[in-house]
Amino acid sequence: MFKNTIIGIFILVLSSVMLSCDGTGNTGNILLEGVISNSSQFGEITVTVLEGNNRLGRTTVSSEGNFGIRFRSSTGVVSLQFESSTFNATRPNIQVVDLSTTNLNITLQLNPTLIIIDRWQVFQDPISLSGSQAIDYNESQAEFNLDGNGGNCMFAGGSTLITYRVKSISIVNCREGVRAQSSGSIVLEADEMIQISGNRDAILALDDAFIGVGQTSNPINNTIVIQSVNQFGINASGNSIVDIDPQNQCSISGGRMAVNVNGGASVDTSTCTLSDA
């Protein structure tokens, strides 16, 4: 009896490993999900996530047009392939980040064959990088959302570089909002609104760090709101640099003070309105 149980467990674990290796086990820390608005026009649709020629995951679209695939990515760039008896096309260059969910609203078009992304949302878990790691995320359609659920939201230490150039940015419900130290850098740029809020410092720069928050090279209506409930909207010390570059309206507020600068730090708030509690 005991021997049979051990054999059964071994087979179960082996099956799980095999599924994970061939990309069909629906495992990983990245979730790509979506809804196809006109899926009923194409019959049964299969969706495949590809990284180069490697299949990371595959699923069948539900009768309501929904799909979801979990996977791991070594490059951070994947393709989505949609196949049915009447449709076959691939959407390349979809950027993904570990510990995130990408949600796409999609329309499939024939004559010409197109995959149209009507809305692109990213829901990111808190980010903490150190050493020489990097995130370089550039997607003008993406709405970036990070809810810290009361914890720290975004951290860059060492020589880490975190860059997001997207449609909009929402970093909220944080203990500390955006923090960089040592020689770490964080660059957050959006076509539209940027919101950063924390219970403590909304933006904290230490040592030789750099934090830039502002408009993209082609903004639509970029506005910035930086808010701390109990500490500083921006807190900078050492030789750090914080640069705020809005296109339009900008406000920075803090429970203690909007901006606090110590040592040789530099903070440029541009045209932002500063307010203290």
Image (tube, rainbow, N blue to C red):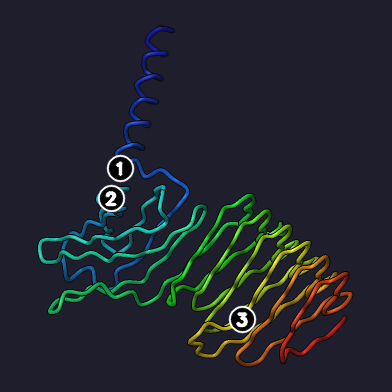
Could you say which quadrant of the image residue 124 lies in? Answer: bottom right
Which of the two residues, 107 or 28, is positioned nearer the viewer here?
Answer: 28
Residue located at (31% from left, 48% from top): 57
Q: Residues within 10 Å of mark 3 (few under 14, many from 20)?
A: many
Which of the two residues, 150 or 259, is positioned nearer the viewer here?
Answer: 259
Q: Is residue 137 left or right of residue 242?
A: left
Which of the two residues, 129 or 101, is positioned nearer the viewer here?
Answer: 129
Residue located at (29% from left, 69% from top): 36
The CA distance from mark 1 to mark 2 is: 6 Å
Viewer-nearest of labels 2 and 3? 3
Q: Position of residue 70 (x, y in %)?
A: 40, 50
The residue that mark 3 highlights is 214
Q: Disc 3 marks which amino acid?
A: Gly
Q: Residues within 10 Å of mark 1 (few under 14, many from 20)?
A: some
The CA distance from mark 1 to mark 3 is: 40 Å
Residue 58 - label: 2
Q: Is residue 215 left or right of residue 117?
A: right
